[in-house]
Structures are given as C-alpha cells and as structure tokens.
Amino acid sequence: GTAAAGAGVPIARVTIDSSGFVSLGANSSILDMTGTGTLGFNTVTNRAITTGTGLFTAGGSLSVTGAVVTLIGNSTVINMTGTGTLGINTVTNRAIQTGLGLLTVGGSLSVVGSAVTLSGNSTIMDMTGTGTLGINTTTNRDIATGTGTFTVGGVVRGVNGGPTAPSY
C-alpha cells in the first residue's frame, strides 16, 4: 500500500516486510505523535511488546499496570543516577516483601517502625567486620528480653568494664 508522507521523516525510510516487521531506516529513529492524547502501542488487543537487548529509556515516570515486574538478568540492579533518595513505595506506604534470598544493605539500615521480627528458626544476628557489635549504644535505651533463656557465651562486663558476677 501507499501512505502519504507528512512533516518529519519521509515514508520512504519506513520498511514493512512480509512478516509485518516495521523498520525505521534512520539512525536514532523517533516514533512520534503530533496530535493530542496518548501514543499507544498495542493497547486494543493487549499483545506482549518485546524489545531488543538494547537500553530501554523512559523519559518520564514509568507506570506498570500489571502486578509483577520481572528482572530476568543475572545480578540485576535497580539504580538511580540522580541526586536525592531512591525510594521504594514511599508514596502509599505499602508493605515490601522479599523472597527467601539474601537481602544485602550496603549502608546503614534504619527502621522507622517499632519492631524488627526475625521469623526464622534459631535466627542469628552477626557482624562479619572487626570492632564491637553494639545494641543501643547511641541512645542508651533499656534492652528488654522476653521470658525465654538469655544465654551469654563470654564474660559479662559491668558499666565500667569490670566483670560482673551472675546473680541467680
């Protein structure tokens, strides 16, 4: 068929092959809409849209209407190159759930809520670096435990660093 060329890229640079593939012949080709409304890709029949292995860039906010975003690559990264804070669900304050894999936090972890629950069996809080693992050493708040056994594997020291005899 034929199509009338409008302003911009001439229709001669557009190729549609026998399989229905559309090719834009220029470098850094742009598909644009000059009218009002929303530029849509396959929104009538809701077919999947597949891109190549190149970079996908969204110039504005990206909204996903479906329930799942799957990152298929190995060691996939969500990154922010601008300034400020990268936020996950900070507008609607929804719960964030991870799978059973390891969650690694590269900096300090701040919990705004009132509880941290370790739900595994025989859960361990550990520090792999050097120095002293501190609990509540900045604000000197009380530390309360439940009615279970509190086991100390080493020497218990008093306020001034001297040993404290256990009381039974």
Image (cartoon, rainbow, N blue to C red):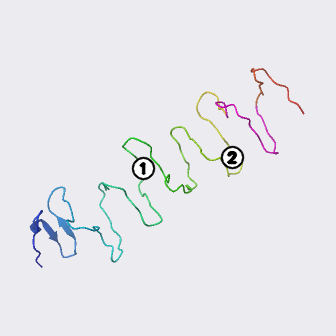
Residue 2 at x, y percent in the picture = 10, 77
| Residue at x 76%, y 30% (from the top left corner) | 154
List x then y, in percent, for residue 110: 57, 41
Q: Quadrant of the N terminus?
A: bottom left
- Of pointers 1 and 2, the one earlier in the residue sequence: 1
Residue 99 point in image, percent of width and height: 56, 56
Q: Residue at x 44, y 60 (%)?
A: 70
Q: Is residue 149 left or right of residue 17?
A: right
Relative to residue 30, is residue 40 depicted above or below?
below
Q: Amino acid at mark 2?
A: Thr
Q: Tell me the amino acid under the disc marked 1.
A: Ile
Disc ID at residue 29: none
Q: Residue 34: which quarter of the image?
A: bottom left
Circle number at residue 78? 1
Mark 2: which secondary structure? loop
Instruction: Kindly report the distance in space between the C-alpha atoms of the residues bearing marks 1 and 2.
Output: 29 Å
Q: Residue at x 36, y 74 (%)?
A: 46
Q: Is residue 65 above or below residue 107?
A: below
Q: Nearer the viewer, residue 31 or 78?
A: 31
Q: Which residue is mark 2?
A: 123
Give the magenta range: 135-153
Q: Secondary structure at mark 1?
A: loop
Frontmost residue, 123 versus 117 = 117
* Residue 122, x across and y down, in percent: 72, 47
Q: Residue furthest bottom?
A: 1
Residue at horizontal 41 percent and vertical 55 percent from the top: 73
Nearer the observer, 114 or 44: 114
